[in-house]
Amino acid sequence: MNFLVLGDIFPSALPFLKKKIPSIIKKNKIDFVIANGENAGKNGMGITKKIAENLFKLGINVITSGNHIWHYKEILDYIDSENRLLRPANMSNDLPGSGHGIYKFKDMKICVINLMTNVHMPKCNNVFQAANALKKKFILKKNVDFIIVDIHGEYAAEKMALGHLFDGKVTSVFGSHTHIPTADQMILSKGTSYQTDLGMCGDYNSVIGLKKKIYLKKMLNRKNLSRNSPSMGKASICGSIINADKKTGLTKRIDQLIIGENLKKI
Ligand SMILES: [Fe+2]
């Protein structure tokens, strides 16, 4: 079973993804695609119904998110009607949508979980307690066949600790949000694959996807408080391909996927 997982999608990457996703799926015999879509909106924040539906049409099965999920108000209604769009599970229970979903693939059930860390992130419930509860709720080969976890967060140590918390209990844990791909993809000691951050699908000739000149202006001269916008140069696609064992639900192999001109091709 092959999963393609993609990091935070920026608007600059949308045409490149449209062009590349079908061939990535075909070439790597991908069965299921999960992408973080919380930066896909035109100013690099949030996602609209139209963008989400275009991503589903491209072959993305589930869209995860994070702190920017509520940027467009229309999402408050849409997320309740579309279970393929997730928001972090440890956000308040009063909010619409869900932080996990179960999706059928052939005769199997795939569980996708979305969490958000606590350090340097907007306030949400304790991510470790939320992770522990979900770990008890979804059990590999008992009530689901595969479990993929997107942990949206700034601080690497929290993500890595959560990787170990889930080790042996889920197929794969990866991080999102920093927009920088890390090269630490590994299979932990009990068989769960882990990567601190997938990186973004966007223009890397930027500051984490935003226009570099405006970003520097803002940093050098605090008087310039104009809002930055996404850098719309040539995009790269960043993610990983996870090959999972149908018998155990754990990872057999993980390979980083980087396609584009500004980052080294693998
Ligand atoms: Fe984020």
Image: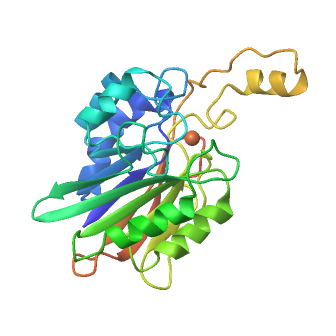
Image spot of residue 258 (x, y percent):
49, 51
- In this view of the protein, can residue 184 be seen by the observer? no
Image spot of residue 55 (x, y percent):
31, 34
Q: Is residue 124 left or right of residue 239?
A: right
Furthest-left residue in view?
107
Image quarter for ligand 1 = top right
Q: Residue at x 65, y 34 (%)?
A: 205
Q: Residue at x 81, y 27 (%)?
A: 216
Q: Which residue is drawn at 46% across and 32% down?
A: 13
- In this view of the protein, can residue 190 be seen by the observer? yes
Of the pair 188 and 77, the residue shown nearer to us: 77
Q: In this rendering, is residue 85 above or below 46?
A: below
Q: In this view, does 151 lie to the left or right of 242?
A: right
Image spot of residue 123 (x, y percent):
62, 44
User: Which quadrant holds residue 229?
Assistant: top right
Q: In this rendering, is residue 238 above or below 77?
A: below
Q: Is residue 256 left or right of residue 35?
A: right
